[in-house]
Amino acid sequence: ILFENMTFDALLEAGKQQVSNGVIKSEGSLVHNALAAMAYELEKLYIQADWIMKQADPAQADYEHLVILAAARAVYPDKATNAQVRMEADTDIPVGTRFSLSAYNYIVLEELNDAVHNYRMMCEEAGSGPNGLLGALTPIDHVNGLTTATITELLVSGKDATGRDELYQKYINSFKENSFGGNV
């Protein structure tokens, strides 16, 4: 903490040092009460200044502010991506039909093979959570004649968004890259 010594008590005492000894400065006096209010407000300002200083340092900044600092070096976090799976059903399924499996919802994107009712589906929630999740689906939307629908294969793995530590490492690595295109 850069301003760890700037506490209410220290600021109050510093303020009292500036007032001559001929003035009553004891607790409850007008001078004490005025200086106490000032010391309280100054302590809040030092707390805020300390927080601002931490956010300006990539090693200490929270994720939101690290994103801003990293962007100045053209380093950006990767966004989470959605898993895509193969579904087999026992009847025709319209594109846009929704299903669920476990805690995840899926939407039919396209038909892969109409002879065997294979479809490409996308998990509506981005991230790696549904990767490897196979099994019987529960329809959210009604489909006439449907008795079974099953996820049989992961086609495209979902990926999680870049975390704070990973983004910080990418930021640090950006200083190790060589310049190109005539830049020194």
Image (cartoon, rainbow, N blue to C red):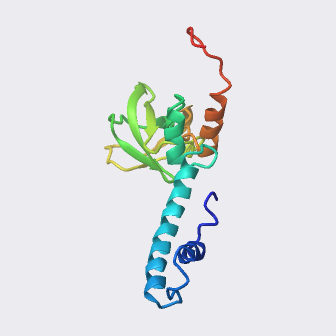
Location of the N terminus by quadrant is: bottom right
Location of the C terminus by quadrant is: top right
- Measured from the top left, where is residue 109 in percent x and y? 38, 32
Residue at 48 percent across and 42 percent down: it is: 126
- Measured from the top left, where is residue 147 in percent x and y? 42, 46
Asked which quadrant contains residue 159, the reply is top right
Residue at 47 percent across and 47 percent down: it is: 137
Q: Is residue 31 above or below residue 157?
A: below
Residue at 40 percent across and 28 percent down: it is: 111
In the picture, measured across the screen, residue 173 lies left or right of residue 121, that is right
Q: Is residue 62 visible?
A: no
Residue at 56 percent across and 34 percent down: it is: 157
Q: Out of 182 and 83, give the one closest to the viewer.
A: 182
- Measured from the top left, where is residue 33 in percent x and y? 45, 84
In the picture, measured across the screen, residue 170 lies left or right of residue 64, that is right
Q: Is residue 45 above or below residue 39?
A: above
Asked which quadrant contains residue 115, the reply is top left
Q: Out of 55 and 141, give the one closest to the viewer.
A: 55
Q: Is residue 51 visible?
A: yes
- Measured from the top left, where is residue 19 in percent x and y? 51, 77
Q: Out of 30 and 55, give the one closest to the viewer.
A: 30
Q: Is residue 57 above or below residue 2?
A: above
